[in-house]
Image: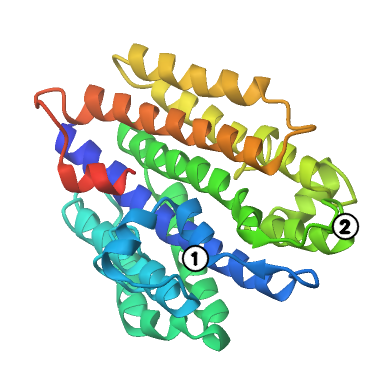
Amino acid sequence: MLSRVAENLYWMTRYMERAENTARLINATSQVLLDLPRGASFGWDVLIQVAGLDKLFREHYPTFDETSIMRFLVSDEKNPSSIVSCIHNARENSRTLREVLPRTAWERINALYLFVNGRAAHAVERARRYNILEEIIERRQSVVGLLADCMSHDVAYYFIRLGRFIERADMTTRMLDINAAVLVPRQQVPEDPAMALLWMGVLKSLNAYQMYRRHASVHVHGTEVVNYLLKDPLFPRTVRHCLDEIESCVSELPHHGAPLKTLRIAQRRIAGMKVDGLTPAQRHEYLDAVQSDLARVHEEIATEYFHFCEQSPDPLKAVAAG
């Protein structure tokens, strides 16, 4: 396979996964706002830091208010990670891959692009935001199901899965940091029932609430939620499961030594992480380290399969990779 084709497949699915996960991040935030404990407030600047976009945001917006942040994350084309930008880039990548992808996949991606272009501006409004973002999530998932069902599971499909699971693992770590944006009064204890509602919102944003209750605990506690979303090997949105899927894909590709070596560093970090007793600041540092591991895995994959004939990768895609 041409490295250009492999790279376009990889980025097509990363962009689509990022659009879906950004929608999930925003809906999780909306749930947090409804469930804030008495006396607590939401630090919008922390949300942008969690998304890793604070520097870019400051270049274009003067204040960290809800309207500006929602516009920046949903419809601002100056943000390469906004939902509109991601779907546009996914469409452009898929348009060049019609000989590789099923025809119906292109049609659904194009339909998603038209839907997002027509509705994104309305998602800034809190009253309409949830339904529009849920529609984006469902339409994107229909593309994933179509590719899994109607595309040969060959080398091209491995690059599709690679992009999906690297992006998904990264965003799961960021979703776990959502509660860092909640500014709680000093007298509030960490395991207050109101705080359990915030963690429940994180689980529901990842569609993980029922599986958490089935496999982890019927009670929602912050430590158990973090442990489940990092280490459970069976649920498709946990970091452990994503890393295992990345390993299975990379193992099927040639010249996989360097990417696998870097990936196993990330796997060992997750396996050795002791969640009990961590303060929110310590947990944030661990999650940052996991995100750095994932960025290095991406760099090794890009070096080995996309840019082995070049001195440096495409700067635009380097920005989008974080």
Q: Is residue 66 above or below residue 265?
A: below
x, y percent for residue 38 = 80, 72
Left/right of residue 49 with respect to residue 104 in the rendered view: right
The quarter of the rendered structure image containing the C terminus is top left
Asked whether 274 or 262 is in front, the reply is 274
Q: Residue furthest left?
A: 310
Of helix, strand and loop, which one carries label 1? helix
Camera-nearest residue between 158 and 186: 186
Give x and y (percent) for residue 198.
74, 61
Question: Please, which residue is most extreme toward the front here?
Answer: 186
Residue type at tag 2: Asp
Q: Residue at x 40, y 36 (%)?
A: 162
Q: Is residue 212 left or right of residue 60?
A: right
Q: Residues within 10 Å of mark 1 (few under 14, many from 20)?
A: many
Residue 248 position within the rendered picture, expressed as x and y whole percent measured from the top left: 48, 25
Q: Is residue 276 left or right of residue 176?
A: right
Q: Which residue in the structure is indicated by mark 1? A: 23
Q: Please give the residue where the numbered disc 2 appears in the rendered image.
A: 192
